[in-house]
Structure formats: structure tokens, C-alpha cells
Image (cartoon, rainbow, N blue to C red):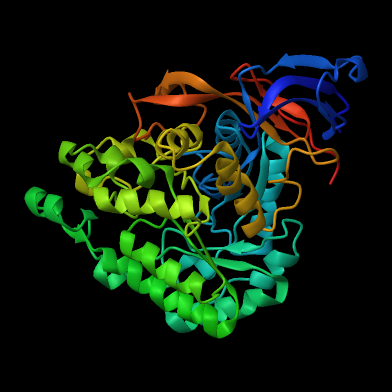
Amino acid sequence: MNHASYLIRSASLLGTTTADVLVRDGVIAAVGENLGESAEGATVIDAAGLVALPGMVDLHTHLREPGREDAETVETGTRAAALGGFTAVHAMANSSPVADTAGVVEQVYQLGRESGWVDVRPVGAVTVGLAGEQLAELGAMADSRARVRVFSDDGICVSDPVMMRRALEYVKAFDGVIAQHAQEPRLTAGAQMNEGRVSAVLGLAGWPAVAEESIIARDVLLAQHVGSRLHVCHVSTAGSVEIIRWAKERGINVTAEVTPHHLLLTEELVRSWNPVYKVNPPLRADADVHALRAALADGTIDIVGTDHAPHPREAKECEWASAAMGMTGLETALSVVQETMIESGLMTWADFARVTSTAPAAIGRLSGQGRPLEVGEPANIVLVDPAARWNVDPSAMATKGRNSPFAGMELPGRVVATFFHGHPTVLGGKLNSPYVHGAI
């Protein structure tokens, strides 16, 4: 357990009120002005000019371990998460072996506790081996020590409507949610990028928006019929936004996420033939990007999920057709959202906290995370310098993946400190030391 005390002095809470925050024994002990007299023995951190936010929560992270340690490990991925301002991540199931049993999700959970940098909540597979033919051990994973509440075959769509209906029905028993990778496989066979003018010019097989939209339309109706929770991963088209908005207006229990890269980047980058821009779903048109930003601002899209997908160099530094799909995102997410949503005036820092912390923690039923900066709450806190500017250098990142689509860009905002259960895992913008978990 962590018994150290820290006085965070003169921070801007959610970008509004300036106050001191006293952290003691892993919780927020006091919030107010001039707390120095009541903070004897505490380490003082000068936070003047910094924004204090609840630790970020990612509902969509690929940590690769077990089995793909050449791409990422739980330790390297959670180091990257801490540097990015995260205090919790949900590890997707497409490891090797697939996280489709209680044994594998408990292994990932234990690796997370041993790594110590952030909370790791495993995501369970919906189907055995991600094959879409048989439901995985949903109940056993939910009852395990990992307490899985999010299930996804991410990377592969649960395309069979009967299988999807059964999964939605099953998870109702323990308040779980099915996170769908919306991609009709028959409409995307051989697809390499967004279908449109650019794909026609480049001669690449197009990935039509309807492949995503048709699955979302089907699944919101299934969720309504069953009365269960549906989460839509990495929404990428304006049409998808309209379907989700329609569903929410009718009271259907659907939530949705958008990635940082889909908020900033467009299909025009594919003209470079750089495989770093190859991703699933693909980068879309400028009109889609603006629709996604507007939907995140008005609440149609609930959260930002990084879809952090590290790959070995050889999987990305090759010809376009052979390259793996995916981008890293944990260490750049905060800055990209600041650039696209806050500096554009579409959102405030309080809105930022909602879409990167409060809402994802609620969707994942993750207690102790996404909590307000109030007395008695767990001290999962990130301090951000909103005035800082930095150049993205993938070689300097903690993640093993070097496939950042933001390489060379200048972005705003830097994480100065990340407090995880009251312990500063990041201090001065650099890794400090991992948090040591108590006994299980």
C-alpha cells in the first residue's frame, strides 16, 4: 500500500477553479486553498499553470501479451499509458492465446498487477478463438478474479446476427457489454483504404462506409430487442454517427467511441503510401472527421478510445498491401484530443474528463477510476501543461511500437505527472516508479 503524502499546489481543477489538492494514503484527503499548514511532511508539487484531471481510462488498448511480446508487453504498454496520463486500460482479447477463457483473462489481470503502472482490466473475447462460431466462456470470465465486464472480438466483427444476439442476451446476467468491431466482412474483402475518390486515384480496393454502418444499424436493433448494452468501437463515418444518434433518441442502450487518429487524420495521407497510415477502420474523408468531432462534442459519441495497436517494425515498414493495420496512441491521445476538441473550442477540459475518464470507466464498470477530484476519492490524477508544445518522436516512446501516425507533428499539451492510487508513476513528464499493488 502507498502511505506517502503529496501536496499538489495551485492546480486548475478541470481547467476552472484553482485549488490545492492533498493526497494522502492513496486518496484525496483535502481540496481547497492554502492547504500547506495541514500538509506537514507532504512532498510539494508546484502545479501553477497546470490542469488537474481524473486519470484517463482507455476502453480499447492492445497490450499483445501473452504471445505477441515482440509487439508489446503489459509492462511496456502500461508504461506508455502512464506517460500518456492514463491510470487504467482495458486490454483487448486478441492475444495469443486469445483471452477467451477465465484462465487467460486472469493471466492478463495478474500481469497487470505485477507491472504496476496502471490498472489493467482484461477484455474477454465474445467467441472462441475470435472465430465467430461458438460463444466463449463469458460467465466464467465475468466470475473470475479479473471480473470481466467488456467483451469484444475486436479486429474481427461478430458478423453472425444469431451469435451477436446470443452474446447480448448472455451478458445481461452480469451487466456486461458487447463491444462490437463494426465491419461487414463480405463488403470489405481485400479492402485497403476508405472507398472514395482517393482510393480510385491510387487504385486501391475501397473500404465502403456502409460496411461499418450496416453492422451498427443491425446491432442497435438487436440491443433494443434484447434489452442489453452495446458499445460500438472506433466509429469512423458520418453515417455511423447518424445511426447512433437515431438509436439514442429511441432510448436504445448504446455507447460509442472514436479514436484520436480518426479525429485528426484523413484518407489524403494515404497518398504518401506510408503504411503507418494503414488502419482498421481506415482513415476517412474530411467530412467524416468533422462529423466525428461534432458527435463527440454533443455526446452522440460517448468516449475517446485509443485503439493503441503496436506492431513490430517489419509488420509496418514494408509495402502497403502487406503491412499490418494499426497505430499506436496511448502517449499521444491527450494531445490529439486537445488539438482537435479543446483548442478548436468544441470542448472544455471538463468535457475532456468526461470522454476520457468518467464515461469509459462507467461503460467498463471499472470502480475506483473516472472519479471526481473530491475528498475521499481515489487519487488517480493527471496534471497537464496545456501550454506546452512537443514534437512526436516514436523512438522516444515507452511503447515497443514505432508505428505512430503523428510522427514529426507538433502537438499541444504534455503530461507532467500521473498519480496512480496516490503514487506518482510519472513526475516531471518522466517515468518515476511503478505502484506496488497490495496482496491479491
Q: Residue 222 or 384: which is nearer the viewer?
A: 384
Quadrant in the picture for residue 385: top right
Q: Residue 320 or 200: which is nearer the viewer?
A: 200
Q: Which part of the image, by quadrant, shows the N terminus?
A: top right
Q: Residue at x 48, y 57 (%)?
A: 301
Count the numbered circles shown.
Answer: 0
Quadrant in the picture for residue 217: bottom left
> Residue 269: x and y, percent?
22, 39
Q: Residue 38 or 266: which is nearer the viewer?
A: 38
Residue 59 visible at all: yes
Left or right: 80 as drawn, with respect to 21:
left
Above or below, comparing residue 160 to residue 331 in the picture: below
Above or below, comparing residue 65 to residue 280 in the picture: above
Q: Residue at x 26, y 40 (%)?
A: 275
Residue 319 visible at all: no
Q: Residue at x 61, y 31 (%)?
A: 15
> Residue 394: x and y, percent?
40, 26
Left or right: 380 as drawn, with respect to 39:
left
> Residue 115: x and y, percent?
68, 35
Q: Residue 18 or 302: which is nearer the viewer?
A: 18
Left or right: 263 as drawn, with respect to 15:
left
> Residue 90: x and y, percent?
60, 50
